[in-house]
Image: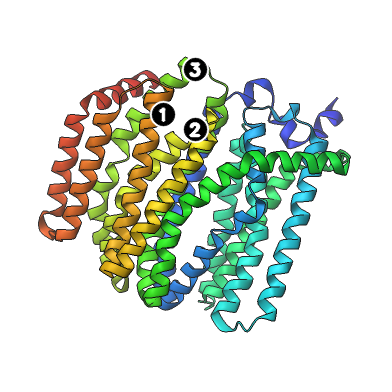
Amino acid sequence: MTARRSSRGIIERLTTPTESSSVMTNLSLAFFAQGSTLVVSIAMSLVVPKLLGLESYSYWQTFLLYAGFVGLTLFGVNDGLYLRLGGSVYGSIDRKLLKGEYGLIFAAQFFIAGIFIVFILTQDIRGDLLIIGIGVCFYCLSANSFSLFGYTLQAVNLTHLYSIASLINKIVFVAALVVLFGTGYESYAVLITVYVLSQVVASLYMLYCLRDLFKVGACDLRSSVSLVIKDIESGIKVMVAFYASSLIVGFARIMVELNWSIEEFGLLSFALSTVSFVLAFIGQISMVMFPVLRRMGGDEQKQRFFQIRNALVVILPLVYVVYPLGAFFLTWWLPDFSDALLYLGIAMPICVFDGKFNLLCSTYLKVLRDERYLLLLNVAAMVVGIALSLIAVHVFKSIIFVAMGVVASIVFRSVSAELFLARRRLGLRVGRYLASEVCLAIVFITIQLLNIEAMGLPLVWCAYLLYLFFNRGCLRDVFRLMGRKT
């Protein structure tokens, strides 16, 4: 009996009926892992630019810009797999089909990466562009492996394993950086290498968790191809929606890179990457919520929407209050990046509106299987963002207007999505809350543009307190919910 139990895989030991339905375990580990990841990411965003300097840091950000699009080579198959398996129990899925699908996907990834490497080496590309191009190709393999395994674990409500993998990723990255920078290897090329290897290690951990796949025979090729095509058909809408969303910021960064110096590009990228760390944390919490909400009935889903929205109305705008203190610290710690603080201040509303969109709207649109609307919404926001970026670059010739265009596009998307969900799907009224959020964002950006240093923090505090008074019903609900949980 003991020998038989010891031979069971880690997945089987962790998917008993009680544990697989334990939302609190997943949430607790997700908060801990992603909270730790957030802290590490913010710390690295402060350490890396100081060690690399503005020029090398700008090349590092160029790599991150183009590395952000490597998921396109999956053609949405990971999103389709996530939607198909969402809410399932790992023990109930067909392991042979999953193994066959993995095999086809990885064969395609190596083929695509190989083609890109050959293309880069046969072109007249030298120096920094060659390093960045090769780095993106290897990152394609590591990042897509990490994504595929992670989506599988999260879809079957084993988010705690994915959270551990995310934590391993950051720990390996930080440990390697400490060693490399401690020995004098202060190069963005080394940073790219470490970034790729840390994801390889985390992917190997998840593959170890899924090691029972090696014990089953693969299904026939025709069934595997059919399943891949099916997942691509359902997932490509989500993938296009995601990358349309990414292009709101990505196109703005590309336009700045093409029309301004590498240093100016680095300053804007520093501001946007700092914001992205907060959004990455929020995004992973939404991945925990999806399989849980998928199992609920309509009335309970509506109740949870109401509770989550009220909590976000109160909590997310706290970033405005924290920002002046963070800006003071950044001015002292990174004096070479002090010009980026204005861009960072303008970008702060992204944390509120993009955070709410990812945690609430995008999650519910997937739960309700409204992928088509999610796609249309993100494409519309992308078109608005591209138009505003082109106007900012060619008419106003101002990076400040580029940043404001990005914020306006994200606000448009978040407000449109919440109005659609609340009114047409859940029968709720949210107009007054959205109006107060937009007004608070306008007040905050105006304070940043006026550069009122001495009065900045008191004015932000007063604006936030007035905002809470206007939304005191949400505040009462949050306190009431916290009291029940306690």
Residue 256 percent location from the top left of the image: 38, 69
Q: Establish if 29 lies above or below 253.
A: above
Task: Tell me the residue that label 1 is attached to.
Answer: 421
Q: Image point 61% across, 42% down: which residue?
A: 162
Badge 2: few (under 14), some or many (20 or more) residues near its Cα, within 10 Å? some
| Residue 298 shown left or right of residue 209 in the figure | left
Task: Tell me the residue that label 3 is attached to.
Answer: 298
Instruction: Point out the tag, 2 or 1, that comes first from the N-terminus.
Output: 2
Q: Nearer the viewer, residue 30 or 102?
A: 102
- Tell me which amino acid carries mark 1: Leu
Q: CA distance from mark 3 to mark 1?
A: 13 Å
Residue 109 percent location from the top left of the image: 72, 57
Q: Establish if 262 lies above or below 245.
A: below
Q: Quadrant of residue 87?
A: top right
Task: Tell me the residue that label 2 is attached to.
Answer: 365
- Observer-side mark, 3 or 1, equals 1
Describe the element under mark 2 as helix, strand or loop: helix
Residue 394 appears anywhere in the view = yes
| Residue 303 shown left or right of residue 99 in the figure | left
Q: In which quadrant is the N terminus drawn?
A: top right
Instruction: Point out the tag, 2 or 3, that comes first from the N-terminus.
Output: 3
Badge 3: few (under 14), some or many (20 or more) residues near its Cα, within 10 Å? few
- Tell me which amino acid carries mark 3: Gly
- Tell me which amino acid carries mark 2: Leu
Q: CA distance from mark 2 to mark 3?
A: 13 Å
| Residue 186 shown left or right of residue 356 in the figure | right
| Residue 2 shown left or right of residue 297 in the figure | right
